[in-house]
Image: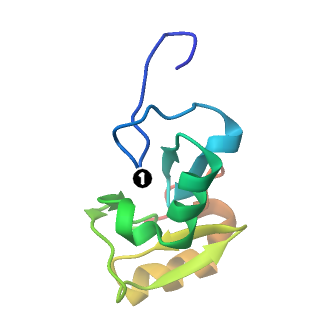
Amino acid sequence: MNTLDITVPCMVDDSREAIIDADHKAYVNYEIYFFADAKNRERFVKNPLKYCGIITDPVSRERFVPTRKSPALDHDGKPFYFMSDSTMALFEAHSDSLAWPNYKMIM
């Protein structure tokens, strides 16, 4: 994106431009978020539900807005939220094939 001169707003402070590099990004499910600085990235990581908006269930592939009541787990240090307990259970059983970047459709 940098080479294409594409700019992205910071997910925590949309009045600032995000830095598009590995040190300024975070994941929730398959979505990638970028931030203007390390402080904003940390704010996001501490409470991703406050900022992430609509995400994709990694099993059903349905889009939804996660809440505190959404089933959730961490996999390889990344948070994953699910639409139901059943999709979370399938993810746990097949996390090697469902966790990005190794995603393979099993349904």
Which of 107 and 102 lies nearest the eye of the viewer?
A: 102
Does residue 56 appear in the picture of this structure?
A: no
Which of 77 and 49 lies nearest the eye of the viewer?
A: 49
Residue 23 screen position, x and y as percent:
70, 42
Give the total number of marks visible in the rendering: 1
**Which quarter of the rendering shows the C terminus?**
bottom left
Element under label 1? loop
Q: Is residue 21 left or right of residue 6?
A: right
Which of 96 and 70 lies nearest the eye of the viewer?
A: 70
Q: Is residue 56 left or right of residue 4?
A: left
Asked if 65 appears above or below 56 in the picture, the reply is below
Callout 1: few (<14), some (14-19), or many (20+) C-alpha neighbours within 10 Å? many
Q: Residue at x 69, y 65 (%)?
A: 96
Q: Residue at x 62, y 80 (%)?
A: 93
Q: Amino acid at mark 1?
A: Val
Which of 92 and 1 lies nearest the eye of the viewer?
A: 1
Q: Residue at x 41, y 86 (%)?
A: 86
Asked if 18 appears above or below 84 in the picture, the reply is above
Q: Residue at x 66, y 71 (%)?
A: 75
Residue identifier under label 1: 12
Here the colouring is rainbow
Residue 101 screen position, x and y as percent:
64, 48
Does residue 54 appear in the picture of this structure?
A: yes
Asked if 22 appears above or below 46 in the picture, the reply is above
